[in-house]
Amino acid sequence: MTTVDGRHPLDREAERLAYKPPEVRHDIQGDMETEERVEKAMHHFVKNFNSQTASYLDGCLHCGMCADACHFHVRTDDPRYTPIWKLELFKQAYKREAGPFALFYRLFGFKKKVTIDQLEEWQHLLYDSCTVCGRCSLVCPMGIDIAGLVSMARHGMFMAGLIPHELHETAKRAAETGSPLGITPDKFEDRVEWMADEHDVEIPMDVEQADVLAVMSSIEIQKYPQSIAATARILNAAGESWTFRTDGFEATNFGMLSGNPGWQKEATMKLINAAIKIGAKLIVLPECGHAYMALRWMGANMYGKPLPFKVMHISEYMADALNTGKIKVKKVDTSVTYHDPCQVSRRGGATQAARDVIRHLGVDFREMEYGGDYNWCCGGGGGVVTIKRADPLRHRVFKLKMDQVEKTDADELLSSCANCRQSFDDSQEHFNWDYKMGSLMEMVAENLEDEA
Amino acid sequence: MDLLDFARGPALQVAAYILVAGVLWRLVGIIMLKEKPEFSEPRKPGGFMAALKVIYTRSFTAAPFKRATLYPKMLAYVLHIGFFVVIFLFVPHIVFFEGFLGFDWPGLPNNLIYLSGVAAVVAGIALLVRRLTHPVLKLISNFDDYFSWFVTLLPIVTGLMMPVRMGVRYETLLAIHILSVAVLMIWLPFGKLGHTFLVFVTRGTTGMVFERRGAKT
Amino acid sequence: MKTIPTLGDILQAQGVSRRGFMKYCAATASLLALPPAMVPRIANALEQARRPSVIWLSFQECTGCTESLTRSSSPTLEGLIFDSISLDYHHTLQAASGDAAEAARHAAMEENMGQYLVLVDGSIPMGNPGFSTIAGISNYDMLMETVEGAAAVVAIGSCAAFGGIPGANPNPTGAVSVQDLVKDKPVVNVPGCPPIPMVITAVLAQFLTFGQLPELDIHGRPMAFFGQTIHDRCYRRPFYEQGKFAETFDDEGARKGWCLFKLGCKGPITYNACATVKWNAGTSFPIESGHPCLGCSEPGFWDKGGFYAPLSTGKFDSGEKLAGAAVAGVALGAAAAVAGRRRQAKYTKEA
């Protein structure tokens, strides 16, 4: 009997006996010298080391349990997909450069300098095979937030020009045009108008003063424009003084996903400035997971002081409006299961909101086994869905999600994240799967009572 | 000065100095790095209580991970509990602690101590075998993991040899036992055994960060 | 040539019965870990033995060792055997003094050149020869002169064997043991403070029986008596295993005869026959009378921390150095953090 070594695991998905083919494509951006690249990576790794990350990087026991929480490892048995292994270079940099015993690590070479080959290999580990879903952070007996560290490690990778092309191009487009899908303010306005006509709903745009600033994600604007109408109907029904703004409508943050803190800040500041300009008391974020993380939890830190307004995910807003009676919904006779967007539920703390909304809808709610905070990720978060070369891996990982959904035997599958929806749609097509993901917000919008 | 006197005297003393200095070195070295500012509006009060909560709750496995991590967790529990029972409930050890703490507590009969020690060693060996054979652990393990394993098990093994003796003189075994403890004390602050104190920092940090978000901890 | 009476003759003359004598021989055989078949041989050898010449030298000592051998409440077989050697010089016991005494020593040495045994109690001061002299002769000179023609030397008591109380820190007289000085003769250590009388006579008996010295352990002690620890043979050992300990000398545990480990018993590291041979004609031994073993037959027992400090107590000095270590640790940690931050600042600028 042969044994399968860690670097060349069996391909269990293949139709006939096969070893997993090595992935060879390492993307490189810019025309830096190798040395400069390595140095850049190192410097931007080091910039992230604070007392919090330091304790995490110093605390790992190498128990390997995070592998059991990671969908990429669980589905492939490839040990390189062990979450903490994805941070090996980041750890290496920390121990050498900033840890309490860094002097010894450098002096005696206990930890070697990170090399370009390593960085290239880790491109796959830090991008293609991590959705920053944070499931690993929950299994860690030391309580290390591994997912948070992956986000930080990406800074070094980005600055060294060592990230997957697709993600880089998407992020670059977002930085240049304001939207990862190239949606300009004009285009946004067009689409809003179109939706207003088509759905016969009033959609305020560029109002000078409003209590609520609503924003959208490019995915919705482009692929699921009905979300625009649904958002409007809900806010109208609640009687809010609200508006969309052409100078701050894009909620996604590819600067954050790709690892460019500068771009991340630019995108965040656009929203903050727009909200301040109109004197908004609240920004309602769209059905997008990472937008919630970027503005709700990281926004104030980008701003450098507490935000002068509140930030809510649309599911939180709906839950609040339903709980306080601001809006009312008709009962819906169907059975529903809900896919939690990782950044909203597990990492964002808004798990309960969607459940409140579902309760008001009066449906037969079927929680997935270990749903909610322990939900399996859709496989497309953290920018993974943009990376073409990662598709086979993402599809493979999606099987876990399919099983989880199928076990509930619910009529409808809902979520509250356009990015999840996008990767569900893609995988659904790939597998010819029966389940079509719907939007929680759209279901609410369609069943509003006493709509104006 | 014979070996036992050396072990009980200078060896233990120097080990204690290194232990104290090393632990503080590592803790201060971590804590004094720059602070991460946090301006987001909390959903729940985080703070110290959140830290305490997670320090406690992470001692147990969340339900979804129970099946997958059952084996290593079980072994880890046995190793930790066995080790703690041996260290803190063996009467000669209690007397040792009383020597500088000034108070004592009730101990356990020796046969229970031997049982705990043997269980800890067996669990330790099983964990090592796992580390040597499990693809994930093979990949992520380094010198620290193996050396830390060695210096952890050594005092238990030397301690367990004392009643068995196997022809070695008691005072020699006792000296070796104490020296092995000194080695453990010296290594503890620097390698992964630092989790004895870092666990409070890492869990506490996560508790404070995620509890204020109202997120799962 | 005058006839020298054998040991058998002497014992008979003193009224020791044949049965009593055989009992002693059997006890000796078992102490020496010899098979029962050897008992008649011991008896025979002892009965036939000529009184060996023994020179007993007392140096820096308290006479406790001699007391231990002579102060038996009733004459014991050991005592009688001891009487039966030709103790040609022992300045505490002999009647002669001064030049006459020294003359007796010289006479014995000359008469039994290469045959006699030297028994020593007390340690030898090397700091200044004037610290301890006998008839104007320094202990060192007397020892070296006397052992020259000896067959073997037996160091009686912990002072002679290991330096003892005179050698205790700070050792003002520069006291050393016999084995520190005598390198070219076999030295048997019979330590203890005092040693068990039976052990001395048994060593002598073996020498008389087989003409050889017993097998010794790493500290030069007869294995037969010093091969096992007090702890291993202690009748209170079960209480140790059960975790039942006397906490003070007058608590319930002490009254119930529980283990004295916590009261400082050195039994686990003390090799001696007290727990089996016992004292005062087999009456008891210290632990049996409720006092922890002091470890008096071990080298350096006087400097091993307090008699009442439990064996597992570490020897820590004041907390000052520990506080110093803590301060150093904080300083190193702070320095490491500052260095880390500097590198960060540098990198931020470069980046």
Image (cartoon, rainbow, N blue to C red):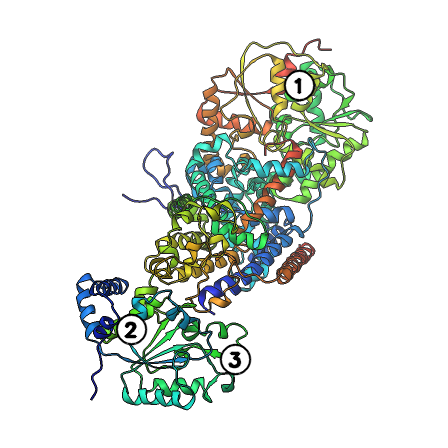
The front one of A280 and A162 is A280
Rendered position, A11 above or below C292: above
Apparent side of residue C97 relative to residue A422 in the rendered image (left or right): left
Task: State how far apart marks 2 and 3 are (Cα).
Answer: 31 Å
What type is the residue that disc 2 sits on? Answer: Leu
Sequence-wise first label, 2 or 3: 3
Image quadrant where one finds the C terminus of chain A: top right
Instruction: Return the x and y of residue C270 as percentages of the image width and height.
Output: 41, 62
Task: State how far apart marks 1 and 3 are (Cα).
Answer: 102 Å
Q: Nearer the viewer, mark 2 or mark 1?
A: 2
Instruction: Return the x and y of residue A20 as percentages of the image width and height.
Output: 39, 41
Image quadrant where one finds the N terminus of chain A: top left
Could you tell me which chain the residue with mark 1 belongs to?
Answer: A
Mark 1: which secondary structure?
A: helix
Could you tell me which chain the residue with mark 3 belongs to?
Answer: C
What type is the residue that disc 1 sits on? Answer: Ala
Q: Determine if marks 2 and 1 fall on one subunit.
A: no
Count of marks overlaid on the render: 3
The residue at the point 45 percent across, 77 percent down is: C123
The numbered disc on residue A230 is: 1
Q: Nearer the viewer, mark 2 or mark 3?
A: 2
The front one of A128 and C212 is C212
The numbered disc on residue C204 is: 2
Mark 2 Cα shell of 10 Å, populated few (<14), some (14-19), many (≥20): many
Q: Quadrant of residue C226?
A: bottom left
Mark 3: which secondary structure?
A: loop
Residue ID for mark 3: C173
